[in-house]
Structure formats: C-alpha cells, structure tokens
Image (spheres, rainbow, N blue to C red):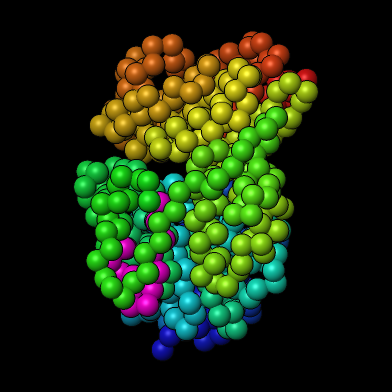
Amino acid sequence: MAATPSSLQRLHLIATGGSIMHNLALALHQRGAQVTGSDDEIFEPAKSRLATAGLLPAEEGWFPEKITADLDAVIVGMHARPDNPELLRAQELGLRVYSFPEFIYEASRDKQRIVIGGSHGKTSITSLILHVLRYHGRKFDYAVGAQLEGFDLMVQLTDDAPIIIIEGDEYLSSPIDRRPKFHLYQHHIGVISGISWDHINVFPTEEVYREQFKIFAEMTPKAGVLIYDQDDEQVQLVTVPSSPDVKYIGYGPHEHVIRDGKTYLITKKDEEVPVQVFGAHNLRNISAAKEVCKQLGIKGKEFYEALATFKGAARRLEKVREGVGSVVYKDFAHAPSKLKATATAFKNQYPERKLVACLELHTFSSLNPAFLPQYAHTFDAPDVAVVYFNPHVLEHKRLPALPPEAVQQAFQRPDLRVFTDSKELAAFLHAQNWQNANLLMMSSGTFDGLDLNQLAAEVTN
C-alpha cells in the first residue's frame, strides 16, 4: 500500500537530527503521526525544534530496542551507516525501511511532482517557486533543504495538495540505497539548473557525475517537461531532446539592469521590476522558476508581483548587516561553481567597492587534494581572497594533510591568503580597512565558531 501521509501512523526516524530529516519528523508529527527518532549527534536548530515538539530523543545514540514490530515504517537518513544497530534491527524484523526520497515519493504518488535538480541553484529555484505559489494562495506540498522566510517547516505532506515541489539532490539516498535522491522522485516536471562536478567521494569522475543527470533527464515521462540551463555546456550534453513526447524548455539569465547596487528585471513589456536578490546565477534561477510557474498556471504578471517580495533562501547570498559604505553577506557556497558565481556576482553588484571574500573548505570534496584543482581561477573576482580550513577536519574525514601552499597553488592565485586557525583569520579580518569595502563569508560550516555578527558590526561601523 502506498505510504500516504494518513496511512502510516507509527514511524521511527534513524538520524532524525539531520536538516531535512528533522523537518520531516516535525511535518509527520504535525499531521498526527506518532513519531520517534534517534541520532548520535543533534545540533541546533534541530535540537530546539525537536525538543519544542516533544520529539527530541532522551539521549543521543542508537537504541535497537526502539525498533519494534508494531512500527508501520522506519525512515533512514544519510547520516546513518549501513551497520547502524537500529537499521539492522528493522531489517531483522522485516519492517518497511524507506530512505527520505523513497518516503517522499510514496507520500506523493497521486500528486504532480516538480523536481528541481542541479549542482547549484536548486535551493534558490525551489524557494522562488514556493514563494510565488504561496503568495498566490495555491495549495502545494514541498521538500526543500534550506529555511525559507514565512515557512515554519521545510517539509509539508498533506492529502489534498495536488502538486509537490521537491529540491532534487543528486547525493545518495541512504546508506543502503546508493542511488541519487533525484532518481527516486519520478518527476513530471524536471529542472536541471547546472552541472559542475561535486561529491568526489561518491562520483569519482566528472563523467560518472554527469551521467546521474543524464539518467534524470531521460526519466522525464511522456507529456512531461524538462526545463534546463541552455548555456551550461555540461547540461547541454545531457538534455539533448531525445523524446518527441517530452517538452524541452531552455532558459538563460533574465534580462535586467543594475543601478546603484540594486537589480531591476526588465519584462517583455519593458517594465522594470525591482528584486532583492542579485547576480547572474540568481537571474538564471529566476528564469528557471518563472518557467516552472508558467507550467503551473502562474502568468508573467503574477510571477513578477510575487517576486518583488522574495528575500532569498537562508544562507544563499544572505545579508548579515549593512552600513553607509559597506555591507556584509554570507553564503552557503563551497563548490567551485558556486564560489565563482557568488564572488563574481557580489563584485559586479558593488564594482566601486573593495571586496574581501573568505571561503571555508569544509566538505570532503573541497578538502580532497584530487579535487582541489577544480578551484583554479574560481576566486579571481575579490580584491582580497582568503581561504580557511581546519586541519582537524581533514583528520576526521581521514584525508591527507593539506599544506597551505598546495591550496594557493590549486586556486592559481599567488596573493591568496590561507589560514588554518580561526583566531588568526578573525585578527586578519578585524585589521582590514573597511571604508568603502564589503565582506563576503562563504561556507557550509561556521568558520569554527567565528562570531560573524560581531565582525559584521565592526565592518559596517
């Protein structure tokens, strides 16, 4: 039987503290299911949010005794390992074990599924679509990775919404299912926003990585729609129109003008629409979202009306603080393509100001010596470019030591500053002259607890 949101009442989540998994736990609890969960480490904001809902495990760790025969299903997150004691117990009892994407698919079998894929831009595109649909009072379900203003949860599953908008991650589905997540959603409308090799620990070559998007493109069903970035060379290789029964829609950056640090979209009627996001990559994201919304019956005028109030997804070029002659932004960028797009966009938005930009190497790929050369010339836009990494993270990920000179060489920027101590990084930033200068901090981590709000206050004052 399909796992409709109302049919499964007793559920246990393994690795419930993950960013998307804890949102799923909260969403299932909200619609009345009896939800339990476990994890060996739970950080904020997941910890407080689960505690408020009464879903925080009494103690961290794995407890196979929680897995009982009367459970309707177990949902396992990517953070768990294949030999997880609770997972082994669930398999032993013959319980239905879902990965996150499997469960989302089962819960949305009877809905129109819109899946946003791509190495970069997918969170922003998904967030844009959600914002527009919500603005116009449309009914929809969703699953997206980043927190969005105006949305309490980032997963919603109901029985009556006719559509679901899903951020389609290409990473693995679960520790026991090595398929990319976006292969399991079985989209009706698919988006590929761009392809830039990532996740070297899973996809060892660019070709293997690109193949996952080719499979996704070819999964587009009869009468389905595939929307793609028509200027991305890697995307062009996988979106060759191969089925007469599929509608293929290419898009480019939205026509625009920049004045005084503000971006205005130019419509087909030559009207100017001010927007709160900026950068060539975001102008492409807007075009992709507009094409999806068009397929869902949202007209151009309605799209622009809603877009004017869109502030962006959390940590995607998010403004921290602004002063008279300086502004501080933070961004989730870590992959080479994201780094280049974000740094270039920020410099182009404020060309007359000095740009100091910092990148934290934090992911397995970004710290891997075999992958580092992918960063060559991706950090050329800032006036002052800084890279930070913590050597202890290398040890934790069982990667070889990384000499700062090797990082400088990989980026092919002789004046690149490389720090391995967060206090030294902070001292360097505090010592900069911030008159007519901006700061951009990019990481999927936290720069090891660097107080960004305090730093931003100094910069903007």
Q: Which residues are magenta?
A: 216-229
Left or right relative to 112: residue 323: right
Left or right relative to 153: residue 421: left
Q: Nearer the viewer, residue 407 or 337?
A: 337
- Name the residue furthest bottom: 1
Q: Residue at x 54, y 67 (%)?
A: 294
From the viewer's perspective, is residue 327 above or below residue 129? above
Q: Residue at x 65, y 39 (%)?
A: 263
Q: Residue at x 69, y 68 (%)?
A: 136
From the viewer's perspective, is residue 200 above or below residue 230? above
Q: Position of residue 59 (x, y in %)?
A: 56, 57
Q: Nearer the viewer, residue 197 or 449?
A: 197
Q: Would residue 134 be visible to someone looking at this image?
A: yes
Q: Is 222 contained in the magenta span? A: yes
Q: Nearer the viewer, residue 181 or 82?
A: 181
Q: Nearer the viewer, residue 311 or 457?
A: 311
